[in-house]
C-alpha cells in the first residue's frame, strides 16, 4: 500500500500555504468593511456555547480549506474511532475513552469486547453514596467529629482538574466546608493546606492513577503522620483516607480498605480525568446532582462534536483555527483569558490539557514531524491581565491569538460589576481586531510626537466564547470543547495526543539524585560538571560532604 501523504504534502496544506500568502496582510478592518454581516455570519453555537470567530484573520476560503484539511487528515474518522473505543493511543496501545465517563446509562462502548459504561456508572454511584455520607455526617472522622475539610492529594492530571473545578464552582458548595489541594512535593504546600485545620475533621483523598507518583506518595505519607500523631491511633487512617486509583495493591499497602477506593481505568488519561473518580473532591463540594449536571455539559459537547457538521462544529473550528495561526502565521502561543475570576485556574488546566497532549515531536509512525505541533498555552483571568501583559498583545511584535471567555449572567451577589466586566471582553476583542490608527489619534487631539507610540495596529485575532452562566453544566461543556479542539489538532498533526513520555522521563530522573542529596556520608558524584557543582553546593549548604575527586 502506498504510504499516506505527509501533512505538508497534502493538497489542502499546499492550498492553505498559497492562500496564506494572499491573505496574510489583509486587515480585519478590511474584512469587516467588505462584509457588514461578518460578525453574525462567522459564528457558531453548540451545547449552549456561542463562538464568535469573526475576528480571526480568515475568509470563507480559509474555513473551506481548513475543513478540507480536516477531511484529508481523517479527523472525523479518528473521532469516530475514539468514540468507538478503538486503541487510538497507539504508543501505549490504549483506548481513549474520556467520553465514556459521561456516556448515559444504556449506551454501549466496548473495550476488548467489554462494555465499560456499566462500570463507569457503578463508580459514579459509589462516589455519590460516599459524598452523601460525608455531607450528611454518616461518614465522620475517627473521633466522631463531622468532616469539614477535604484535601485532595495528587498532582498533574490528578490535581489540576479538581482544583480548577472547585475554584470555578465554589458557589455551589457548602461554605462551611473547606476544600484544599496538595500537589507540590515542597513541604510548604502541605503546611499551607493544613495549618489552620483540625485533623479530626479532615478527610484526605489520595488521588493517583498509578499510586506510585513521588510527590503524591510523599505528601500522602506526611498526611498519614499528621493524622496518626494528632489522633494517636493507626486506626484513624481508615476514617481519614480514601483513595482514587487504578492500583488496588498499592492502595491496600497504604492501609486504605479497597472498599474505600474509587477506581478508574487505563483508558482515562490523567489530564482527561476530572470527570472520573478523580473528581471525587468536586462531587463532595458541589454534590452528586450538580456533578451529574457537569457530566451532562460534557456529554452535550461530546454529542455536538460527534454530529455537528465541521462548519458549525465548535471544537473542530477552534482546533483548525489554532492550526491556522500555529502552522501558517507561525504563532508560538495562545492566550486563554477567562473573564470570570472563578475560572482563574482554567488557563493552568488547559496548559496541561493542551501542552501535554500535543507537545510531541514525532508522528504516529515515529517519524520526526516537519511542522510545528502544540502551541504554548498561557493566560490569566480578565480583567487582571489587561493591566499587565495585554500591552504586548496589543502593541508587541508577536502574534498571539487569544480566546476570551465570558458569561452573560453573573453568579456574584455584586451583580453591578458584571456589565463592567463584560464590557471589557467586548472592548478588548474590538481593540485587538481594529486597533487605533494614527488618523483617529490625530483627530482626537493626540500630540504629534506621541502618535507613533499610541498607534495600535490591530489585526490581532480573537475567539470570543460566550456561555449563559458559570454553572456545573457550562463548565463541563467548556472543558469538553477544549478536549475536542486538542483532539482535532492532534489528528491533523498525526501525533499521539494521549501519551506523555516526557512526563514519564521526568518521573524517573530525580530518583537517581535523591540518594545523592540525602546521603550523610561522603558521596561521589558522576554527573556532568554542572550537575556535580550544583549538587556539591547544595550538599555543602546542608553540611554534607562530597568526595574531593568528584
Ligand atoms: C496526565 C499525566 C500526569 C499525571 C500525573 C499524576 O495526563 O499523565 O500529569 O496525571 O503525573 O499521575 P498519577 O495520577 O499516576 O499520580
Image (spheres, rainbow, N blue to C red):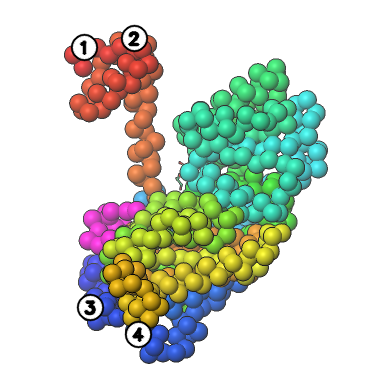
Q: Please give the range of residues in magenta.
A: 359-373
- Is disc 3 surrounded by few (<14), some (14 to 19) or many (20+) residues within 10 Å? few
The residue singled out by tag 4 in the image is: 30
Q: Which mark is residue 548?
A: 1
Does label 3 or label 1 sit earlier along the sequence? 3
Please state the horizontal and vertical placement of residue 300, each as a whole percent of the image.
60, 68
Q: Is residue 114 left or right of residue 292?
A: left
Does label 4 or label 3 sit earlier along the sequence? 3
Q: Is mark 3 within 8 Å of ligand 1?
A: no
**Distance of label 4 from label 3 (alpha carbons):** 17 Å
Does label 2 or label 3 sit earlier along the sequence? 3
Q: Which mark is residue 521?
A: 2
Q: Give the SS element for disc 1.
A: loop
| C-beta proximity under 8 Å, tags 2 and 1 | no
The residue singled out by tag 3 in the image is: 21
**Main secondary structure type of the part rendered in magenta:** loop
At a point 60% along the width and 27% down the height, the residue shown is: 223
At a point 39% along the width and 88% down the height, the residue shown is: 33
**Distance of label 2 from label 1 (alpha carbons):** 13 Å
At a point 59% along the width and 55% down the height, the residue shown is: 342
Amino acid at each position: 500500500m502506498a504510504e499516506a501523504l505527509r501533512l505538508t504534502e497534502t493538497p489542502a496544506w499546499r492550498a492553505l500555504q498559497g492562500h496564506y500568502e494572499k491573505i496574510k496582510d489583509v486587515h480585519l478592518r478590511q474584512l469587516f468593511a467588505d462584509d457588514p454581516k461578518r460578525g453574525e455570519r462567522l459564528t457558531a453555537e453548540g451545547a449552549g456555547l456561542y463562538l464568535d470567530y469573526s475576528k480571526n484573520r480568515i475568509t470563507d476560503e480559509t474555513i473551506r480549506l481548513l475543513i478540507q484539511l480536516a477531511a484529508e487528515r481523517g479527523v472525523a474518522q479518528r473521532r469516530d474511532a475514539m468514540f468507538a473505543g478503538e486503541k487510538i493511543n497507539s504508543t501505549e496501545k490504549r483506548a481513549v475513552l474520556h467520553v465514556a465517563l459521561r456516556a448515559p446509562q444504556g449506551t454501549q462502548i466496548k473495550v476488548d469486547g467489554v462494555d465499560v459504561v456499566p462500570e463507569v456508572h457503578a463508580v459514579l454511584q459509589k462516589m455519590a453514596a460516599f459524598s452523601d455520607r460525608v455531607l450528611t455526617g454518616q461518614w465522620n472522622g475517627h473521633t466522631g467529629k463531622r468532616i469539614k475539610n477535604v484535601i485532595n492529594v495528587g498532582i498533574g492530571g490528578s490535581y489540576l482538574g479538581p482544583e480548577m473545578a472547585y475554584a470555578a464552582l465554589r458557589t455551589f458548595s457548602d461554605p462551611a466546608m473547606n476544600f484544599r489541594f496538595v500537589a507540590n512535593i515542597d513541604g510548604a504546600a502541605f503546611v499551607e493546606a493544613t495549618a489552620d485545620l483540625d485533623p479530626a475533621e479532615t478527610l484526605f483523598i489520595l488521588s493517583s492513577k498509578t499510586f506510585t507518583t513521588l510527590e503524591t506518595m510523599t505528601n500522602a505519607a506526611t498526611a498519614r503522620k499528621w493524622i496518626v500523631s494528632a489522633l494517636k491511633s493507626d486506626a484513624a487512617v481508615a476514617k481519614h483516607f480514601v483513595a482514587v486509583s487504578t492500583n488496588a495493591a498499592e492502595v491496600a499497602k497504604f492501609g486504605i480498605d479497597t472498599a474505600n477506593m474509587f477506581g478508574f481505568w487505563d483508558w482515562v488519561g490523567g489530564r482527561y480525568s476530572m470527570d472520573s473518580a478523580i473528581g471525587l473532591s468536586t462531587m463532595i463540594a458541589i454534590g452528586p446532582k450538580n456533578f451529574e449536571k457537569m457530566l451532562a455539559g460534557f456529554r452535550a459537547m461530546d454529542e455536538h462534536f460527534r454530529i455537528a457538521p465541521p462548519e458549525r462544529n465548535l471544537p473542530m473550528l477552534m482546533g483548525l483555527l489554532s492550526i491556522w495561526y500555529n502552522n501558517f502565521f507561525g504563532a508560538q502561543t495562545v492566550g486563554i483569558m477567562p473573564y470570570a475570576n472563578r475560572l482563574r485556574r482554567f488557563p493552568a488546566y488547559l496548559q496541561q490539557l493542551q501542552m501535554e497532549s500535543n507537545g510531541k515531536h514525532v508522528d504516529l509512525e515515529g517519524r520526526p514531524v516537519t511542522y510545528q505541533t502544540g502551541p504554548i498555552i498561557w493566560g490569566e483571568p480578565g480583567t487582571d491581565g489587561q493591566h499587565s501583559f495585554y500591552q504586548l498583545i496589543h502593541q508587541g511584535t508577536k502574534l498571539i491569538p487569544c480566546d476570551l471567555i465570558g458569561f452573560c449572567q453573573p453568579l456574584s451577589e455584586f451583580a453591578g460589576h458584571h456589565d463592567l466586566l463584560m464590557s471589557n471582553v467586548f472592548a478588548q476583542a474590538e481593540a485587538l481586531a481594529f486597533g487605533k490608527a494614527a488618523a483617529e489619534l490625530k483627530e482626537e487631539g493626540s500630540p504629534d510626537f506621541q502618535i507613533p507610540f499610541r498607534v495600535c495596529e490591530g489585526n490581532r485575532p480573537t475567539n470570543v466564547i460566550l456561555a449563559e452562566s458559570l454553572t456545573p453544566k457550562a463548565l463541563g461543556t467548556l472543558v469538553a470543547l477544549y478536549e475536542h479542539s486538542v483532539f482535532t489538532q492532534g489528528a491533523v498533526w498525526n501525533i499521539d495526543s494521549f501519551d506523555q513520555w516526557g512526563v514519564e522521563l521526568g518521573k524517573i530522573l530525580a530518583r537517581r539524585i535523591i540518594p545523592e542529596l540525602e546521603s550523610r556520608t561522603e558521596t561521589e558524584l558522576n554527573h556532568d560538571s554542572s550537575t556535580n557543582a550544583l549538587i556539591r553546593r547544595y550538599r555543602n549548604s546542608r553540611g554534607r560532604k562530597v568526595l574531593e575527586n568528584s
